Image (cartoon, helix red, strand yellow):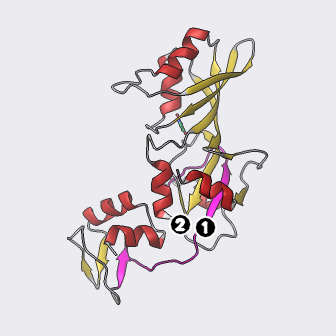
């Protein structure tokens, strides 16, 4: 098995991330730093990633977490802020978050040890929509809603088609449900800023068919087999 697939299957990282780790010299095979990205792992090879021995884990696990604000989605944080992994108190497998949510964003985050699955749902344009409920400043006119749907320039990048509906109108704020099919850094915040309505609160309420539902902040559950299948588009 090719080394990047081997690393992804072991649950350490996505295949793309595995390529980066190899490039950065963080992968050793049988004691030597690997300098061949296309290396095929042989039976008996001992593979280390960032100093830790890895092996193919049989059991794949898929978790839906309701991320509270105030947590980072990286495995460690140089500012010492709490990470989403701190919330998983009884999970033995080494899982990682699929994609990112900002420190100040709450809501649905999927964590898994299945690198290929992770890549599948993180990949832009593959059809898995991510739905956010955004409380924004001011009023969203029909024209603005149409702009969000058509695509807005968020600084050198025009967003592709999105779905957007008003969820609630308040005297000074509007709550909008928006589904996007790509994942530029801080994309939803940038889209609303671009139309003049900065985001005040942001929560992810669905990834494809998987809904956040009534899962309490900071708690998690396993995805059902049906949910897992539904994401493999
Ligand atoms: N878009 C954002 O702006 N922030 C997130 O956390 C996710 C999507």
Of the pair 170 and 213, the residue shown nearer to us: 213
Q: What residue does disc 2 label? A: 113
Residue 20 on image: x %, y %: 31, 59
- The residue shown at (44%, 28%) is 160
Q: Is mark 1 within 8 Å of ligand 1?
A: no
**Figure quadrant of the N terminus:** bottom left
Q: Is 210 above or below relative to 14?
A: above
Q: Residue furthest left?
A: 35
Q: Position of residue 142 (x, y in %)?
A: 61, 10
Label 1 sits on a secondary structure element that is loop
In x, y percent, where is residue 50?
Answer: 37, 71
Would residue 99 be found to the left or right of residue 19 on screen?
right
Q: Magenta segment: does it hold 61?
A: yes
* Among numbered discs 2 and 1, the one appearing first in the sequence: 1
Q: Main secondary structure of the magenta part?
A: loop
Classify 229 as above or below 43: above
Left or right, 32 with respect to 217, comes to: left
Q: Residues within 10 Å of mark 2 (few under 14, many from 20)?
A: many
Above or below residue 39? Residue 165 is above
């Amino acid at each position: 098995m090719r080394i990047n697939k081997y690393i992804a299957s072991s649950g350490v990282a996505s295949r793309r991330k595995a390529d980066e780790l190899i490039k950065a010299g963080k992968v050793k095979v049988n004691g030597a730093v690997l300098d061949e990205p296309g290396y095929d792992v042989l039976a008996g090879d001992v593979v280390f990633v960032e100093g830790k021995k890895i092996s193919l884990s049989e059991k794949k696990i898929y978790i839906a977490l309701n991320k509270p604000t105030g947590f980072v989605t990286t495995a460690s944080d140089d500012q010492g802020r709490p990470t989403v992994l701190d919330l998983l108190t009884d999970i033995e497998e080494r899982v990682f978050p699929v994609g990112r949510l900002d420190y100040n964003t709450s809501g649905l985050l999927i964590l898994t040890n299945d690198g290929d699955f992770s890549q599948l749902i993180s990949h832009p344009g593959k059809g898995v929509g991510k739905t956010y409920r955004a409380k924004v400043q001011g009023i969203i006119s029909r024209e603005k809603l149409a702009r969000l749907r058509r695509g807005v320039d968020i600084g050198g990048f025009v967003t592709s088609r999105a779905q957007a509906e008003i969820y609630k109108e308040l005297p000074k704020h509007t709550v909008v449900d928006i589904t996007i099919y790509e994942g530029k850094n801080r994309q939803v915040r940038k889209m609303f800023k671009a139309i003049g309505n900065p985001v005040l609160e942001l929560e992810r309420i669905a990834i494809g068919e998987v809904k956040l539902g009534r899962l309490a902040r900071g708690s998690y559950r396993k995805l059902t087999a049906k949910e897992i299948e539904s994401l493999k588009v």
